[in-house]
Image (cartoon, helix red, strand yellow):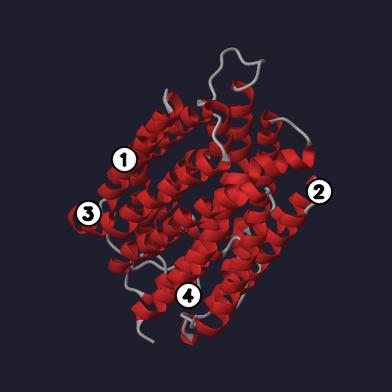
């Protein structure tokens, strides 16, 4: 099968998965308040711990699934992950208590390898010089889903906070069926390796990656970038309800605008700037724009200005494809899943730390106990973390002369 046709199948898979994810975002605060009977501030804290549960499972499961994908291939791991995600949506939609909500997030954390496995699929299929563009297009698929999903979720949320979860479950099951019959395997038999439990854990995966200074340095950049990045999904709905008294429909519309901006950047703009700037400069611009946008969210006085800030923040779509294209060029074909598993585990570690911190920060500065009222405090913290990532990237540029050249080094196979 031609690579572009195979990617088209993968694009649709990520698109459907993203729609399912976006559908539930506008209604999460209302579902938590319905089940717990708590206030918005307390619901924000609970939301942070739900994300913590998800992240903890992702931290431990991602290296295992990444290594399994290097042994069995990408297709079966991707399909199993999507099936688990569908079951998670069903469970959360039905959940009568907070215990069941947490059970759903634990299942979702195990299944969180979808995006990483898709990135490994791209690394299998395309040469290093083309990967950044296809990583970005996959991000655009997520962006399109983020346009459609929150808009649908905002509308369905008016029927009740559980309705979007059932809709997301239906989409996830459709995605499983689609992938089973359509999605081909990308990992050739000669590029597979035996599963090794000593490498299929966070420490083992990081140990392999840490052998390579450039990959290690970029992982640190990515770590601090993602610490800040989680501010938006962690507190967006709570922040807009608290500061602007937005409805689920308005929250859905704003998140759809985020998706539209992401599509423009990752499906079109990055393909224009990458050949001119290269992945390093592209990542630098993305980090600067991200920091500026977080400052904008933190201090924005009027609701309509959010849409201007979103337009600037969309340039964060430059960061991940650029960094991942460089990192993937440094590892062999039989370790792409391991690399993505290590990055997924790192994302899990970040999500263990960042969402509880962001939601607790929001809860404190939105409460009567705060020294001063400042619901935008999580976004200020995110801006600072993004600037740390920016400084680390500048230091990495100075420390590696052949920064953007593929390496002949190999991770242990």
Mark closer to the chain start, 3 or 2: 2
The residue that mark 4 highlights is 334
Residue 99 is marked as 2
Q: CA distance from mark 1 to mark 4?
A: 30 Å
Helix, strand or loop for disc 1? helix
Category of crowding for the residue at label 3, using alpha-carbon neighbours closer than 10 angstroms: few (below 14), some (14–19), many (at least 20): some
Residue nearest the viewer, comparing 11 with 69:
11
Category of crowding for the residue at label 1, using alpha-carbon neighbours closer than 10 angstroms: few (below 14), some (14–19), many (at least 20): some
Helix, strand or loop for disc 4? helix
At which x and y percent is residue 356? 64, 37
Q: CA distance from mark 4 to mark 2?
A: 40 Å
The residue that mark 3 highlights is 273
At which x and y percent is residue 296? 39, 29
Residue nearest the viewer, comparing 204 with 230:
230
Q: CA distance from mark 1 to mark 3?
A: 19 Å
Residue drawn at x 33%, y 45% is 315
Q: Is residue 354 above or below residue 174?
A: above
The quadrant holding residue 134 is: bottom left
Q: CA distance from mark 3 to mark 4?
A: 30 Å
The residue that mark 1 highlights is 394
Mark closer to the chain start, 3 or 4: 3
Helix, strand or loop for disc 3? helix
Q: CA distance from mark 1 to mark 2?
A: 44 Å
Q: Mark 1 touching mark 3, by CB under 8 A?
A: no
The quadrant holding residue 331 is: bottom left
Give the mark toward the camera: 3 or 4: 3
Residue nearest the viewer, comparing 333 with 353:
353
């Amino acid at each position: 099968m031609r690579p572009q046709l195979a990617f088209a199948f993968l694009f649709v898979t990520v698109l459907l998965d993203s729609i399912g994810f976006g559908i539930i975002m506008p209604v999460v605060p209302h579902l938590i308040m319905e089940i717990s009977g708590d206030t918005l501030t307390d619901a924000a804290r609970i939301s942070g711990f739900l994300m913590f549960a998800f992240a903890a499972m992702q931290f431990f499961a991602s290296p295992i699934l990444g290594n399994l994908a290097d042994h069995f291939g990408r297709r079966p791991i991707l399909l199993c992950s999507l099936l688990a995600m569908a079951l998670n949506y069903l469970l959360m939609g039905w959940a009568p208590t907070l215990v069941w909500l947490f059970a759903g997030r634990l299942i979702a954390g195990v299944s969180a390898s979808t995006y990483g496995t898709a990135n490994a699929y791209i690394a299998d299929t395309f040469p290093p010089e083309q990967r950044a563009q296809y990583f970005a297009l996959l991000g655009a698929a997520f962006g399109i889903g983020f346009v459609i999903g929150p808009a649908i979720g905002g509308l369905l949320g008016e029927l009740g906070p559980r309705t979007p979860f059932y809709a997301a479950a239906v989409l996830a099951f459709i995605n499983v069926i689609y992938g089973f019959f359509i999605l081909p395997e990308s990992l050739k038999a000669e590029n597979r390796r035996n599963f090794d439990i000593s490498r299929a854990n966070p420490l083992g995966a990081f140990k392999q990656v840490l052998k390579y200074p450039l990959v290690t340095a970029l992982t640190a950049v990515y770590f601090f970038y993602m610490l800040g990045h989680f501010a938006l999904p962690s507190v967006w709905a709570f922040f807009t309800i608290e500061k602007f008294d937005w409805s689920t429909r308005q929250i859905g519309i704003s998140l759809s605008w985020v998706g539209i901006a992401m599509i423009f950047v990752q499906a079109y703009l990055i393909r224009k700037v990458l050949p001119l700037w290269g992945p390093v400069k592209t990542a630098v611009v993305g980090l600067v724009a991200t920091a500026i946008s977080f400052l904008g969210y933190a201090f924005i006085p009027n609701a309509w200005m959010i849409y201007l800030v979103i337009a600037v923040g969309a340039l964060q779509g430059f960061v991940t494809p650029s960094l991942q294209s460089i990192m993937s060029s440094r590892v062999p074909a039989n370790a792409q899943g391991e690399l993505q598993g290590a990055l997924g585990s790192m994302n899990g570690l970040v999500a263990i730390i960042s969402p509880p911190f962001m939601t607790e920060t929001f809860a404190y500065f939105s409460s009567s106990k705060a020294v001063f009222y400042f619901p935008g405090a999580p976004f200020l913290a995110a801006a600072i973390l993004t600037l740390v990532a920016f400084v680390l990237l500048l230091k990495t540029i100075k420390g590696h002369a052949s920064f953007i050249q593929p390496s002949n080094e190999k991770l242990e196979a």
